[in-house]
Image (cartoon, rainbow, N blue to C red):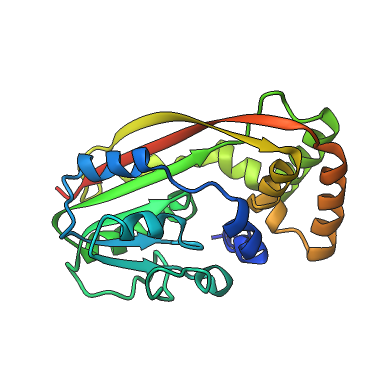
């Protein structure tokens, strides 16, 4: 993969503590829907792949007796506090063959869809499940000020994140794979935030996290000045699941 794409994917470690503090977690409704769709009960052995700081891991440990968290970034992984997290990646999952009943991925499959499916297939048991979830939260009511949006969009363009959004579709991983056709659903949720938290949320996106620290700090100061007041965020929770054929 291009070096700039790898830098984007690995950028979240630059803001790991802020990510853990302000980034949206996964609702009970979303996780329960995925578990029910795959027919998983508390005895299932599951993996949180690309676990980040453990936001999805915490939901999984509340439901299953055996949960493994795998995360490549050291700064993110050290904040996982509910299980012993393992260093690894979608390309190299440090688990035996046919070990798991399901693999969960939160807000990350789009980073490794080209390279990760064979390893996911390897570690799943026959008819094992793959559950994907994303929280889409960028739009706000009312909209952020135009000057702030211009700054954010400039980073989105310059970083290459816009190019990825417009040219890649993670669903392309599945035709011809060992998995059944995907099933997708969307849940609508909403959160209320003040301007300070909204500005911090923006700073946890890859197009800002990838910036050098001094540039990110300068941008944070600008956003803090511009983004004020109260905002409502309509969150679109995207779910997708499938099983091995």
* Quarter residue 211 falls in: bottom right
Q: Where is residue 181 drawn, in percent x and y?
A: 24, 37
In this view, 229 is above or below 67: above
Q: What residue lies at 14% left-to-right and 47% top-to-bottom?
A: 245
In this view, 144 is above or below 67: above
Q: Where is residue 72 drawn, in percent x and y?
A: 48, 70
In this view, 106 is above or below 100: above
Q: What residue lies at 44% left-to-right and 61% top-to-bottom?
A: 50
Is residue 81 shown left or right of residue 66?
right
Q: Where is residue 208 drawn, in percent x and y?
A: 72, 52
Q: Is residue 5 visible?
A: no
Q: Is residue 61 visible?
A: yes
Residue placed most toward the observer, 182 or 43: 43
Q: What residue lies at 78% left-to-right and 32% top-to-bottom?
A: 229
Residue placed most toward the observer, 244 or 34: 34
* Quarter residue 114 falls in: bottom left
Q: Which residue ends up furthest to the top in the rendered image?
A: 142
* Quarter residue 29 falls in: top left
Q: Where is residue 198 drawn, in percent x and y?
A: 70, 41
Is residue 38 shown left or right of residue 138?
left
């Amino acid at each position: 993969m291009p070096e700039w794409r790898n830098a984007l994917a690995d950028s979240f470690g630059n803001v790991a503590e802020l990510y853990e503090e302000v980034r949206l977690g996964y609702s009970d409704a979303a996780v329960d829907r995925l578990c029910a769709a795959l027919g998983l009960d508390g005895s299932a052995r599951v993996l949180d792949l690309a676990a980040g700081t453990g936001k999805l891991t915490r939901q999984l440990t509340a439901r299953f007796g055996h949960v493994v968290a795998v995360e490549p970034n050291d700064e993110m992984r050290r904040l996982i506090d509910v299980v012993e997290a393992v260093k690894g990646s979608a390309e190299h999952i440090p688990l035996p063959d046919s070990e798991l009943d399901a693999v969960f991925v939160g807000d990350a499959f789009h980073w490794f869809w080209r390279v990760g499916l064979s390893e996911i297939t390897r570690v799943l048991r026959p008819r094992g499940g793959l559950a994907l979830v994303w929280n889409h939260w960028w739009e706000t009511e009312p909209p952020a000020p135009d000057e702030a949006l211009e700054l954010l969009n400039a980073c989105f363009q310059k970083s290459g994140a816009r190019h990825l959004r417009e040219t890649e579709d993670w669903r392309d991983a599945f035709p011809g794979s060992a998995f059944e056709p995907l099933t997708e659903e969307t849940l609508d949720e909403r959160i209320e935030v003040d301007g300070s938290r909204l500005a911090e949320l923006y700073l946890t996106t890859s197009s800002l996290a990838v910036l050098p620290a001094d540039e990110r700090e300068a941008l944070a100061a600008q956003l803090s000045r511009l983004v004020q007041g109260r905002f409502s965020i309509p969150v679109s929770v995207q779910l997708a699941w499938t099983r091995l054929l």
